[in-house]
């Protein structure tokens, strides 16, 4: 083989890989649009897909009932599932990247349990950390506690230098601390409060509103461009700190910046829908298995996988028993885990060894 | 004043001093210098100081007229390409992708046609064209070392620092890689420094040797002089004899 044809062979191989990546992202986007539509169509009020599309594209044709069911109830839930799924997917992906650990997600670092503790403060003690937020105080408490947990991690890393192992360990310490505090509150709670608290922790999309959807999309719109802008640096970080630093990446600044973005994503997501396990862990893993870790494919696909998982979960949560919407937290785990295990078992390449 | 000038570098990790006033004659463009010395003599630390990843307590690094300490870390690392000894290879990244990362060197999101062509050519020239689509997690130690070398050579820098580029390679690839590094330095008029443990390879490929021991430069000059100096036996704490090989090359024997 001549040099020239060997080189052009390598070039076309890479172009094929890029084309494949684009096709996969497009397919995932189409799949997501489909699940959103199914999510809006499914439920106790019967409406055909055609009618739903018509009402969405041309709101003026809707009857009063359709307006309430589709615009006020189902669309916010369907979009909330997508937004929160994407946020958790992206948050998990970048946590795994900056901490160089396949198990990192908003749970491992204690952000979810901090949020649960914040919610418990509101539900059990009626305590609002930030006064004057009215009926939103459960959400606001959860958000603030999650941010406090992040700040704690942040401060720690400033003190001790940013080593990923230390961050994971401190995250786990946070997790247990907040769980213990949560149990303390649960111990003193009334039965009603306990029920409320457990329901909150199970995760639910039922609390979705247009405002919350808007906030989620806004946070995504702020954080995603930053992550994309840093995508070469983040890709480089996966080859080790040394290598990244030699390429000119300021590793500790990158870690702190990305960590701030990830904290915001997880805190907002968790405070709005409660503790949803699994999406932040598995979304990125699926993306990694499919397109690898070049951030230009990995980041969008992690967002799409997270969104797909949660959107699918939202459909399932309504379809098991007609008339009942199950908490999504348990469903994400129940459906997701067999799927995830089968992916691991069929996966030929072994990363993270 | 041409070349890379390193003067009076002192460096310590906390109280443990690693480099004591390290400096040497200016390194000339187009030449390959081998940095030799026992384990823990400060070779990697010196590379990190030159590339700006570590800040020395005192001392300066100049490239031609330019004081490198005046540059931002990013700018400095564009002029000085440092290849660390190891990289973590558990990522789901293909060989092509990691070389592309080096080619882009954090500049701009978009991959242009010219970038793709440059990476493909570098992979082919580096003898790892067949690995382009392999994941780095699947490579052997030697293969990932060759990827590292290609990552370094795909970049256009004025100075190239290679930390042990051949430690995991078989005989043929050791010769290939060092010949390619030497040829590239000559062709680009770049300054090359390789840290080597194998004195025979150093004798064969380097234009110039620097012997480092316990954080000090103990000898420098043409390979024939440095290898025959007393300092070398003392530094390695072994007896060293030099003979001439069948092709007029120097052979280093250690006893």
Image (cartoon, coloured by chain):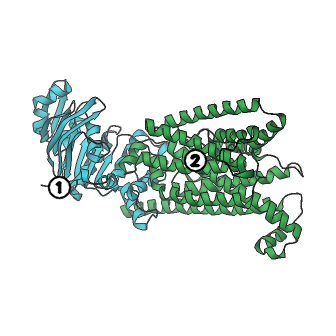
- Does dot 1 land on a helix, a strand or a loop? loop
Image spot of residue B3 (x, y percent): 17, 53
Q: Residue at x 73, y 61 (%)?
A: A210
Please give the name of the residue rendered at 79% of the width and 59% of the height, measured from the top-left corner: A39
Q: Which residue is mark 2?
A: A263
Task: Tell me if A241 is positioned left or right of A219 in this view.
Answer: left
In the drawing, does residue B207 fall left or right of residue A208? left
Residue A114 in the image, given as x and y percentages of width and height: 64, 39
- Provide the chain ID for the residue under circle 1: B
Instruction: Output the letter for the chain in green.
Output: A
- Picture colour for chain B: cyan
Q: Is residue A79 above or below residue A135?
A: below
Q: Is residue A71 left or right of residue A98?
A: right
| Camera-nearest residue between B220 and A245 | A245
Observer-nearest of A185 and A314: A185
Could you classify mark 1 by the number of other residues whose Cα lies within 10 Å: few (under 14), some (14-19), or many (20 or more)?
Answer: some
Indicate the quadrant containing the N terminus of chain A: top left, top right, bottom left or bottom right. Answer: bottom left
């Amino acid at each position: 083989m001549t040099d020239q044809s060997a080189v052009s062979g390598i070039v076309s191989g890479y172009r094929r890989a890029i084309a494949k990546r684009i096709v996969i992202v497009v397919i995932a986007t189409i799949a997501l649009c489909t699940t959103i539509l199914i999510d809006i169509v499914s439920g106790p009020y019967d409406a055909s897909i055609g009618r739903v599309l018509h009402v969405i594209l041309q709101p003026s044709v809707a009857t009063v009932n359709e307006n309430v069911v589709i615009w006020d109830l189902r669309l916010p839930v369907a979009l909330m599932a997508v937004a929160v799924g994407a946020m958790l997917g992206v948050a998990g992906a970048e946590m795994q990247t900056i901490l160089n650990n396949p198990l990192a997600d908003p749970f491992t670092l204690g952000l979810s349990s901090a949020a649960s503790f914040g919610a418990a403060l509101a539900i059990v003690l009626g305590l609002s950390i930030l006064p004057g937020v009215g009926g939103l105080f459960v959400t606001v408490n959860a958000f603030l506690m999650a941010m406090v947990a992040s700040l704690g991690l942040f401060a720690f890393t400033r003190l001790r230098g940013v080593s990923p192992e230390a961050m994971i360990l401190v995250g786990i310490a946070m997790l247990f601390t907040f769980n213990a505090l949560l149990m303390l509150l649960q111990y003193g709670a009334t039965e009603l409060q306990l029920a409320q608290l457990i329901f909150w922790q199970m995760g639910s999309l039922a609390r979705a509103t247009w405002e919350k959807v808007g906030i989620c999309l806004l946070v995504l719109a702020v954080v995603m461009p930053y992550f994309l802008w840093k995508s070469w640096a983040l890709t480089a970080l996966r080859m080790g700190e040394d290598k990244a630093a030699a390429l000119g990446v300021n590793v500790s600044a990158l870690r702190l910046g990305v960590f701030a973005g990830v904290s915001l994503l997880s805190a907002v997501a968790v405070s709005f829908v409660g503790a949803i396990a699994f999406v932040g862990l598995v979304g990125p893993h699926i993306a990694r298995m499919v397109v690898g870790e070049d951030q230009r494919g990995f980041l969008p696909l992690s967002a799409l996988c997270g969104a797909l998982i949660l959107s699918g979960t939202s459909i399932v949560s309504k379809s098991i028993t007609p008339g009942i919407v199950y908490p999504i937290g348990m469903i994400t785990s129940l459906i997701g885990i067999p799927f995830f295990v089968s992916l691991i078992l069929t996966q030929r390449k072994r990363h993270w060894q | 004043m041409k070349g890379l000038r390193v003067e009076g570098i002192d460096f310590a990790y906390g109280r443990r001093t690693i480099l004591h006033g390290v400096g040497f004659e200016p390194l000339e463009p187009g030449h390959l210098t081998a940095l030799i010395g026992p384990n823990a003599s400060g070779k990697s630390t010196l590379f990190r100081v030159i590339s700006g990843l570590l800040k020395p307590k005192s001392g300066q690094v100049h490239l031609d007229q330019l004081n490198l300490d005046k540059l931002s870390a990013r700018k400095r690392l564009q002029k000085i390409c440092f290849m660390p000894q190891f990289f973590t290879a558990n990522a789901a990244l293909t060989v092509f992708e990691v070389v592309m990362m080096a080619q882009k060197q954090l500049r701009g999101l978009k991959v242009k046609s010219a970038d793709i062509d440059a990476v493909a050519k570098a992979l082919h020239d580096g003898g790892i064209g067949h690995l382009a689509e392999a994941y780095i997690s699947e490579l052997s130690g030697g293969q990932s070392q060759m990827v590292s070398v290609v990552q370094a050579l795909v970049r256009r820098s004025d100075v190239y620092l290679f930390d042990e580029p051949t430690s995991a390679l078989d005989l043929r690839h050791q010769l290939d890689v060092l010949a390619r590094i030497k040829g590239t330095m000559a062709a680009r008029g770049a300054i090359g420094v390789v840290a080597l443990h194998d004195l025979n390879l150093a004798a064969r490929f380097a234009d110039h040797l620097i012997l480092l021991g316990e954080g000090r430069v103990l000898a420098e000059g043409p390979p024939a002089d440095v290898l025959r100096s007393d300092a070398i036996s003392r530094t390695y704490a072994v007896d060293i004899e030099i003979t001439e090989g069948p092709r007029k090359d120097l052979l280093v024997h250690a006893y």
